[in-house]
């Protein structure tokens, strides 16, 4: 009995490494209107802004320390901030000019963080030290990616070098490329697929081969047929189709959430509280791999970002390529200003994005969307009593029970919240989206997590 | 930092989009789904039926308004949940019931069962069913005086009501003589809203299509009733179509507040309703047991939920490094 079971397991494991033809079943999820209005508009580069403010917190993890001081001249691609911390990515200047101030800014979460203010000279002089890195093995790739300042460009902003630096005993065999872009409005990744498809395939091949992985699966939501076709063609042209494939995913939200994507692409589940490497996968955003290909070719670190600017309040929705630290007000102006007064401004997509308190705020590396919502779109309807309809339970991709979690939060029941595994929540917003009583369920989940973390 | 923003931006927690659904839309869908059965009850049992439906609904809504007013809480009559309770309670009354009892039942359902426990989402049993049981226990003879469909068209309807036995009572006394087709379209004695299975199933289809309910509870409930009837050597179709099984499984057992929130829990709950219903029908002294079965399972709902709590995604797998 036991031997046949383990044999079956082995056979299953070998079979598992085939490239999937269709996505595997995932849990929960909701259908959100796509609103990809900017999909077929080519990206535009913003004219060099007069002033940029570079936040020292561009990623999840430790903040960077400025290594330039007031009055220093900087060039494009020059290292301006770094940290010795493991969980960190260095920061480079996106403009050439002079450092005018080392200041502070209040982040939307209320924390105060240091900033480097740079006044641009408009010449965009490139840093003379920039040269393509030599990458021949996994360690060199890890070092190069750290040096490039790359953070996950899908929105969460996890330093990419850490994702690549998994321990060998994890038996990682699969590279999963996240091209789902399941947030409404956002088309920044889609534009990368349409504008630089060769870089995406090259970056994927490069990372897969350097890390010694067996296969790559590029997961893209079915609402991007042109991108799927184009990437598929390139894979076939370069005869990589024996170990690389484009997988057409379903269009329910959140297919781009790491754990959901891994399930859809490989049928594996990431153990609770663990990382993708524990399921034998490395997950990179599609724009991130494309950047790696460009970085290995040119050596230019991450200094600018493509951002989808959309929402009911903006005059000309489009994708804008802007240096890191460009002020949101400048970007709004570049997009023709506002056709109605913005009531809510989001950094990121409407499902997981952060609402900003001011337009006087700079963009950061992980930013992929700026949504300017007008009065009607931003209208917040007050929550009513929970009717226990169970829609949040059906919608949760992590199989949690938000309906019961909210009551335990009000009681501050640490043990009960622990039993309901609230730490698995990734705040995708499916529960809040589907709640007919408009309960602030994501907010409850965040409180639940902080109660469990602090133990009271 | 100086703030140059001309307006105040509103900040809130994500998500910043919403499905657009709200409690009132859901309750309106339930009311729409109840329309075919309400129309059929008026056709079969005449103006008395229409009067009871309107009376119960009006009393429930008024009671809710007064209760919220007295408790100094936000008005909730606009969510239509009190109206749903009113219609469902009327559906569970004999067509010839004295209107005063209907008013009493409606007040009991909203004031005692719903508002005293905190209003919508807080009641631990279904208000309409609790009120029906309250009336059944308090006024048993009034609550089991059945009349034949179209009794109001017979010559002596003004003075007297033709009493009849419900199909279940016939079954209990081994004297079942209602044809199956009559059971299906509702040509038999019974509560005013429960007789026409066809109309109720139409409403149920609507609720399923609109995703107001999931099929788990109705299928588990009806399936269990049919299987137990089969085992007991009785006609499963007759058991499903007579009494309140269709009304109960589609509209009453699926009440959000009092049924489990997860799928496994809902199946167990539905099976439990079926078992209790058939136990009462086969072995109890009452001919019908749907109301009791649902209310008893309502009480078990929190325990079913605790026992069927799903483990989060990824809790059953081990890290690949440890394999």
Image: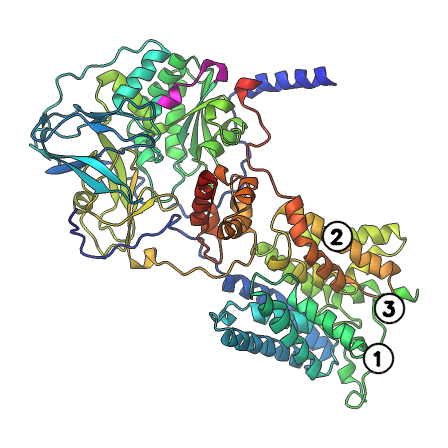
In the rendered view, tell whether residue A365 sits above or below residue B104. above
Q: Quadrant of the C terminus of chain B?
A: top right
Distance from disc 3 to disc 2, alpha carbons, whole Å, reads 23 Å
Tell which subunit mark 2 falls on.
B
Q: How busy is the neighbourhood of tag 2: few (under 14 within 10 Å), some, or many (20 plus)?
A: many
- Which one is in front, B31 or A375? A375
Identify the residue at horizontal 57%, vertical 77% (top origin).
B63
Image location (x, y in percent) of residue B33:
61, 64
Give the camera-side residue of B14 and A196. B14
Which x, y percent locates residue B61? 56, 75
Residue occupied by mark 2: B272
- Residue B273, located in which quarter of the rendered image? bottom right
Membership of A170 in magenta stretch: yes
Is B54 inside the magenta-drawn segment? no
Q: Residue at label 3?
A: B169
> Which range is magenta?
A162-172
Badge 3: few (under 14), some or many (20 or more) residues near its Cα, within 10 Å? some
Residue reaching furthest to the right: B174
Quarter of image, res B64: bottom right
Whole-percent x and y of residue B228?
A: 83, 52
Chain under numbered label 3: B
Q: Is residue A287 visible?
A: yes
Circle 2 SS class: helix
For residue B163, the mark is 1
Q: Classify 10 Å Cα crowding around label 1: few (below 14), some (14-19), many (20 and above).
A: few
Q: Residue at x 64, y 19 (%)?
A: A9
Q: Earlier in the sequence, mark 3 or mark 2?
A: 3
């Amino acid at each position: 009995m036991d031997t046949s079971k383990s044999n079956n397991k082995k056979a299953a494991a070998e079979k598992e490494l085939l490239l999937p033809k269709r996505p595997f079943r995932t849990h929960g999820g909701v259908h959100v209107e796509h609103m990809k209005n900017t999909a077929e508009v080519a990206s535009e580069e913003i004219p060099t802004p007069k002033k940029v403010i570079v936040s020292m917190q561009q990623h999840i993890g430790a903040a960077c320390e400025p290594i330039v001081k007031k009055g220093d001249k900087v060039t494009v691609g020059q290292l301006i901030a770094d940290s010795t911390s493991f969980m960190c990515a260095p920061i480079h200047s996106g403009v050439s000019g002079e450092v005018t101030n080392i200041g502070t800014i209040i982040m939307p979460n209320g924390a105060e963080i240091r900033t480097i203010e740079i006044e641009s000279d408009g010449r965009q002089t490139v840093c003379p030290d920039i040269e393509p890195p030599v990458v021949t093995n996994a360690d060199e790739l890890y070092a190069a990616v750290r040096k490039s300042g790359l953070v996950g460009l899908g929105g969460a902003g996890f330093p990419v070098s850490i994702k690549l630096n998994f321990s060998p005993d994890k038996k990682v065999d699969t590279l999963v490329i996240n091209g789902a872009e399941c947030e409404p409005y956002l088309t920044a990744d889609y534009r990368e697929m349409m504008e630089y498809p060769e870089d995406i395939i090259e970056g994927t091949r490069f990372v897969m081969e350097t890390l010694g992985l067996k296969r790559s699966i590029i997961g893209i939501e079915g609402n991007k047929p042109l991108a799927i076709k184009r990437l598929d063609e390139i894979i076939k042209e370069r005869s990589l189709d024996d170990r690389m494939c484009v997988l057409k995913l379903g269009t329910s939200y959140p297919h781009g959430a790491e754990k959901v994507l891994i399930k859809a692409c490989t049928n594996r589940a990431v153990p609770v509280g663990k990382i993708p490497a524990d399921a034998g996968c490395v997950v990179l955003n599609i724009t991130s791999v494309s950047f790696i290909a460009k970085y290995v070719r040119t050596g230019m670190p991450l200094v600018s970002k493509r951002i989808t600017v959309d929402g009911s309040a903006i005059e000309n929705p489009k994708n804008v390529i802007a240096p890191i630290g460009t002020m949101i007000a400048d970007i709004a102006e570049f997009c023709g200003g506002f056709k109605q007064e913005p009531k809510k401004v989001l950094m990121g997509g409407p499902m997981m994005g952060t609402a900003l308190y001011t337009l006087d705020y700079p963009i950061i590396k992980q930013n992929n969307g700026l949504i300017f919502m007008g009065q009607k779109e931003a209208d917040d309807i007050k929550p009513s009593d929970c009717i226990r309809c169970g829609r949040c339970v059906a919608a949760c991709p992590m199989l949690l029970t938000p309906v019961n979690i909210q009551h335990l939060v009000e009681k501050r029941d640490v043990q009960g919240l622990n039993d309901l595994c609230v730490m698995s929540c990734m705040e995708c917003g499916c529960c809040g989206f589907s709640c007919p009583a408009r309960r602030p369920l994501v907010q409850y989940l965040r409180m639940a997590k902080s109660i469990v973390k602090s133990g009271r | 930092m100086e703030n140059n923003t001309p307006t105040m931006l509103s900040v809130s927690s994500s998500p910043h989009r919403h499905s657009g659904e709200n409690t009132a839309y859901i309750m309106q869908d339930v009311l729409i789904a109840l329309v075919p059965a309400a129309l059929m009850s008026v056709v079969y049992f005449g103006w008395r039926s229409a009067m009871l439906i309107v009376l119960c609904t009006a009393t429930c809504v008024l009671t809710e308004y007064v209760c919220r007013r007295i408790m100094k809480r936000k008005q909730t009559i606009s969510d239509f949940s009190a109206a749903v309770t009113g219609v469902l309670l009327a559906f569970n009354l004999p067509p010839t019931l004295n209107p005063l009892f209907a008013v009493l039942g409606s007040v009991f359902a909203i004031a005692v069962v719903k508002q005293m426990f905190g209003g919508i989402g807080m009641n631990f049993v279904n208000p309409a069913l609790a009120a029906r049981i309250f009336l059944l226990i308090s006024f048993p003879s009034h609550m089991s005086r059945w009349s034949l469909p179209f009794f109001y068209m017979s010559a002596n309807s003004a003075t007297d009501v033709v009493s009849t036995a419900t199909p279940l009572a016939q079954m209990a006394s081994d004297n079942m003589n209602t044809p199956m087709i009559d059971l299906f379209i509702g040509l038999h004695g019974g509560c005013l809203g429960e007789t026409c299975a066809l109309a109720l199933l139409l409403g149920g289809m609507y609720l399923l299509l609109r995703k107001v309910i999931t099929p788990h509870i109705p299928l588990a409930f009806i399936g269990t009733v049919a299987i137990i009837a089969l085992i007991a050597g009785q006609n499963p179709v007759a058991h499903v179509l007579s009494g309140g099984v269709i009304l109960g499984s589609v509209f009453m057992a699926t009440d959000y507040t009092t049924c489990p929130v997860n799928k496994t829990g809902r199946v167990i709950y539905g099976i439990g309703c079926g078992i209790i219903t058939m136990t009462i029908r086969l072995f109890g002294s009452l001919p019908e047991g749907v109301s009791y079965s649902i209310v008893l399972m309502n009480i078990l709902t929190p325990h079913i939920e605790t026992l069927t709590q799903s483990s989060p995604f990824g809790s059953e797998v081990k890290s690949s490094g440890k394999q």
